[in-house]
Image (cartoon, rainbow, N blue to C red):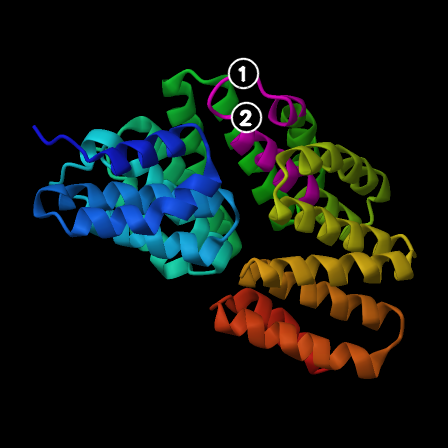
Amino acid sequence: MLIPVPAYRAFREAFRRGDHLTVLGTGQPVLDELDADERQRGLIPAVLLMIGATLAADERYADAAAYLEQGLARLPGTESRRDVGDGDRYALTLVDLRLLLGRYQEAWALVEVLAEPARPPETRLGATRAQLAIMATFGDFETALQLLNTAAGLADRLRSRQLAAMVDGDRAVVLAIQGRVIEAAAFADQVLPSLAHPAPGPLPAWSAAQAVTVATTVARHAATAGDAMTAERMLFLAAEPAGRTGRRFDQAQLELARGVVWREGDRAGDAETALIEARRQFLALDCAPAAAMAQREEARLAATRGLTASARPRFERARDEFAALGLAREVSELDAVLRR
């Protein structure tokens, strides 16, 4: 049996206790030491995956994806499996990163593998939730709703109320994107208390982040549908978990929702500040889809204020960014605006 070198054991312990500075500060020297010893090279994938997971937690999304890809590619048949198992946990993190970065085809290719029946139910649930998110993004709501039912069944099989609540949160998001705001708000009201304040266990961070996504998505779509009361209430419900997660992405989601809600509530100055900040943060995180969305909302704000000369280049920029991501539905909508 392989006995890992002391440097690897110290690195592994730093990762397990959540010591990000040590993981990122010692990762490359540990990789170099392992690579210099043929007997220890089988531990390299584990180090790559641990660095990738740490980078993801620190919201260095593009770098994290690169490390996770390398680690997963090198994992099969190595000694690393003793510490990282089959890698499914890291693969699901990679799927989430690819969605945030707008790498939809690569995300879909990976979730198809992770959703296979031979995979553990936890893995299949994560993959199914990613699949339905992709379907909703591309406007295939019928398939998204079918996948929601599959995800709900997997959550029931796992007998986890928290996972079931997260799936119901997904349902609220899909319904909001579809324009079914009343139904979306009803699901959001039902699940947000348990998402924002989960029971102790392994899911609190994921759950709180899901609460932010649910509340801000429903807030934006309620505002554009003219339901100001629901929009403001959802903004209020998003603020506390957004602050608690400490994630810049969650704060940017909140700023984006504020910009949309305040624009529809005739608070143009506040809306502009919020939307500019949201786009700035999304760009800094390399979250291209969210940045494009913020650009589109900036354009809509300029149009609402009658600033036609300012609105058009913003609409064009948003259109080009959505096109680069392959989001044809958004491109078609913006083409219609630009033809007016």
Frontmost residue, 8 versus 67: 8
Residue type at tag 2: Pro
Q: Which mark is residue 200?
A: 1
Boundaries of the magenta span: 193-216
Q: Quadrant of residue 334?
A: bottom right
User: Does the stretch in magenta take in 137?
Assistant: no
Q: Main secondary structure of the magenta part?
A: helix
Judge the density around disc 1: few (<14), some (14-19), many (≥20) Cα neighbours within 10 Å.
Answer: few
Please, is residue 202 above or below residue 100 in the view? above
Whether residues under marks 2 and 1 lie with C-beta atoms below 8 angstroms apart, the answer is yes
Position of residue 228 relative to residue 313, above or below, is above
Measured from the top left, where is residue 337 in percent x and y?
70, 75
Q: Is residue 19 left or right of residue 274?
A: left
Q: Which residue, given by chain and number where applicable, does mark 2 sit on?
A: 204
Task: Please say if 296 is above or below 171.
Answer: below
Q: Position of residue 254 (x, y in %)?
A: 72, 46
Quadrant of image for the C terminus: bottom right
